[in-house]
Amino acid sequence: MELNSNIPSGPLEQKWDKHKADMKLVNPANKRKFKVIVVGTGLAGASAAATLAELGYNVTAVTYHDSPRRAHSIAAQGGINAAKNYQNDGDSVWRLFYDTVKGGDFRAREANVHRLAQVSVNIIDQCVAQGVPFAREYGGYLDNRSFGGAQVSRTFYARGQTGQQLLLGAYQALSRQIGLGKVTQLNRREMMDLIVIDGRARGIVTRDLLTGKIESVLGDAVLLCTGGYGNVFYLSTNAKNCNVTAAYRAYKRGAYFANPCYTQIHPTCIPVSGDYQSKLTLMSESLRNDGRIWVPKKHGDTRKPADIPENERDYYLERKYPSFGNLSPRDIASRAAKEACDDGRGVGPGGRGVYLDFADAINRLGKHTIEDRYGNLFEMYERITGDDPYSVPMRIYPAVHYTMGGLWVDYNLMSTVPGLFVLGEANFSDHGANRLGASALMQGLADGYFVIPYTLGGYFGQVGPSPLPSYDAPEVKAAEKMAADKVQSLLSIGGKRTPTSFHRELGTLMWDKCGMARNRKGLQEALQEIPAIREEFWKNLYVPGTGEQLNQSLELASRVADFLEFAEVLVGDALHREESCGGHFREEYQTEDGEAKRNDDQFTYVAAWQYNGDGAAPSLHKEALNFENVHLATRSYK
Amino acid sequence: MNLRLHIWRQAGPADQGMMKTYDLAGVNEHMSFLEMLDVLNEQLLNAGEEPVAFEHDCREGICGTCGMVINGRPHGPIARTTACQLHMRSFKDGDEIYIEPWRATAFPVVRDLVVDRSAFDRVIQKGGFISANTGTAPDGNAILVPKTDADHAMDAAACIGCGACVAACPNASAMLFVSAKMGHLSYLPQGQAERSTRAMNMVLQMDAEGFGGCSNHYECEAACPKGISVEFIARMNRDVAASALFGRD
């Protein structure tokens, strides 16, 4: 199948407006005849479900959580970008667009990113109207702060819990529609499969996590808003339940998976403390506004940080990237930390850590100001580590955080399966090879509030209303049987090892061979080892209990089974992309001073992988990226 | 350190349930409380037993999914800390720890430490929002919010919906939760239009769900991992009274 991105013609600035004017509309009386299934209720899902219901569509929203408000968007700390230029510091839609394309190392689609920058301003307005308690100046105006990869202050925030506040805004809008009977909300349901009938996505198979009942939900379109796949690395900043199952099952039903190797390693996380570690905790990037990152100049220096004099410290980001300094983008800051630790200058147990020091900021601004800005983050740090960051520098290390890759979508956010739309982190479209801080919240809400309400109407206008398929249709029954069989197989292996032990084994392999730095040999080894783990999994897994009850081991096993297949797609993509760009760093392709070296002649494309059956290699489809408005440059933050 | 754990085990909603005792050795002080339970569960699985069901997700103290009563206190002994952020350095070798689910009529037990908190969602559905359809909003800076009001709203909005307030209250009252949701919106100019109806509708649903009333124990504030103040309850009571007396409908 030829990939058609459906990017509207015309000048960049006019594409979205022109597209909105060209799209077909669905008249208000007809909207309720269309049933939309929204999977996932994070920022993208909740905003889409609420907005589509407001428009009059008949919406069913599904989440595996006990409440739609628990989605992992809630954990975002730092903020949300928007090109408001309230600070009068030279921001504009163009500059946000340009920063995002450059931050993504020139591997994103220009038209999508420009639209994102355009609607960013509407998002802030919408969220304020909903009552999101953004930080305010004394005059009552909205406050901003700066974030990595930008030289303007365009980040809106609500203390250290911007994600929770934005999600509550969307959740409250969704709750209003549930209360009005416009949205049917299904909690504690896991999507097990996608139902495709006559070439169109027509529904999903769900498993009720309390009763185990396998049940289908049918409709006219399916929106996957199911987040990223960072947990393929086992240890990540993602919530424990985040998984790839929905996206991976859609891939197996014909949706192409794009750029899976673009994974983001966040530079400021609390280091691993032991092998019982279940997840990693992020310390917001906003801390880099006032914190200075350093390691000792001397190798193996074990003195306390306070005993190391100023001239024996290496503020390596300020040294290497003087114009962006501590606010260098995430991929660059992460690699610099790894480099310092690989060089034997890391701090803390195991030498895998660097200091994030607030002493200068506290001297300059006073403890009170720092407390006001980051109080809850400092508290969180102290709770986890037992150290007080007001008196001792934080110790941080990079960790898997976000996945730029995802299901391939066109300009309308539709995947290669007609009627299957993908929003938020689950799609691949806007961040290229590296996402800038405070842009994930922006993208999730842009997709849900301001893009899908238009483009979904365009799709319905084209296909027109049609009767729902029968729940007895052979495609429905077959997908349900497949889901039930998977559950039964997992329960009946009767081996000795726990689902977590396999997840951890896979994650360790992925981190070692396909983590912050990758090379051909390691990736080839990973491609040998993943099938071996998978084989052992299906031979030696132990899941207790039955499928007719709340069974958390079973839920995890089912997700790990999909990670074990998906990991191969990710590694295959990393092996094929013989260049370094953004979060994908191939050791073979670097400049003399260790910076990522892109190969624009050969790799300025989106790699979209098509499933060809179990055991068969996926086929590669390329969507060429045409940069008509920005000049492809070597990304420099020096 | 070595611990003796007494944990509530209940196979399902219909089961009666009972405390069961487990000895756990080799617990590291840097583990979180939930990681300690992970270790126990791996041991149970390796012994062919059913692990302890408990809910958790972000493990960063913000999603509000985790919740268990630890030695009689929701989320355990450390103030303003969720169970996932509680670390084993708060315990010592030889400790006996009692772990139970939230107990409240409106939060029926699903299994072991898992309870059903969907009553909270239904309260929100009755009025815990500002009716602002997408696309209707004026410019963000067209609505000025004095910083102190924004700060008060944010103090209330910090609620993570975990339900510890209900578990801590001898009356199993949800008034701290409901008043926090209400207070968040009532401190903002955008929330004024629906303030009166919101207050009444949310409180009626709160009562319908079977939550008790407030009799000023303040256990909720002490247990709240986000330190939400009971002052919001007073504010809510004023709003409800005003709604009853002067409400438009």
Image (cartoon, rainbow, N blue to C red):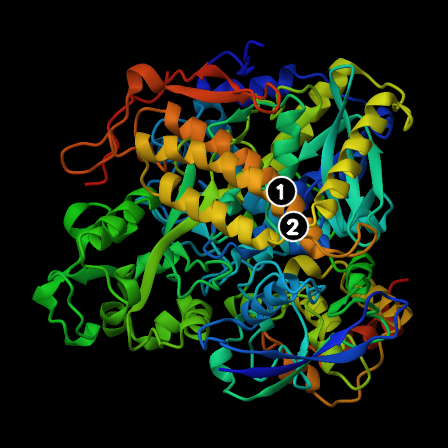
Seen from the viewer's position, the closer of residues A63 and B161 is A63
Could you tell me which chain the residue with mark 1 belongs to?
A
The mark found on residue A495 in the picture is: 2
Q: Earlier in the sequence, mark 2 or mark 1?
A: 2
Few, some or many residues within 10 Å of mark 2 (<14, 14–19, 20+) = some
On the image, the x and y values in percent for residue B244 come to 88, 73
Which quadrant of the figure has residue B23?
Answer: bottom right
Q: Are marks 2 and 1 on the same chain?
A: yes
Corner quadrant of residue A181: top right
Q: Quadrant of the C terminus of chain A?
A: top left
Numbered tag placed on residue A122 in the rendering = none
Q: Is residue B202 visible?
A: yes
**Image: A322 above or below A514:** below
Q: Position of residue A125 (x, y in %)?
A: 57, 45
Image quarter where the N terminus of chain A lies is top right
Q: Neighbour class for label 1 at 10 Å: few (<14), some, many (≥20)? A: some
| Residue at the (53%, 71%) spot, across then down | B85
Which residue lies most toward the top here? Answer: A2
Secondary structure state at the residue bearing disc 2: loop
State if disc 1 and disc 2 touch (CB < 8 Å): yes
- Residue A583 as seen in the image, left or right of residue B230: left
Left or right: residue B17 compared with residue B231: right
Three-letter amino acid code at disc 1?
Answer: Lys
In the picture shown, does residue A200 fall above or below A53? above
Percent x, y of residue A494: 70, 50
**Position of A245 relative to B173 (above/below):** above
Is residue B65 visible in the rendered image? The answer is: no
The structure residue drawn at horizontal position 51% and vertical position 67%, both measured from the top left corner, is B147
User: Does A87 sit above or below residue B36?
Assistant: above
Residue to which mark 1 is pinned: A539
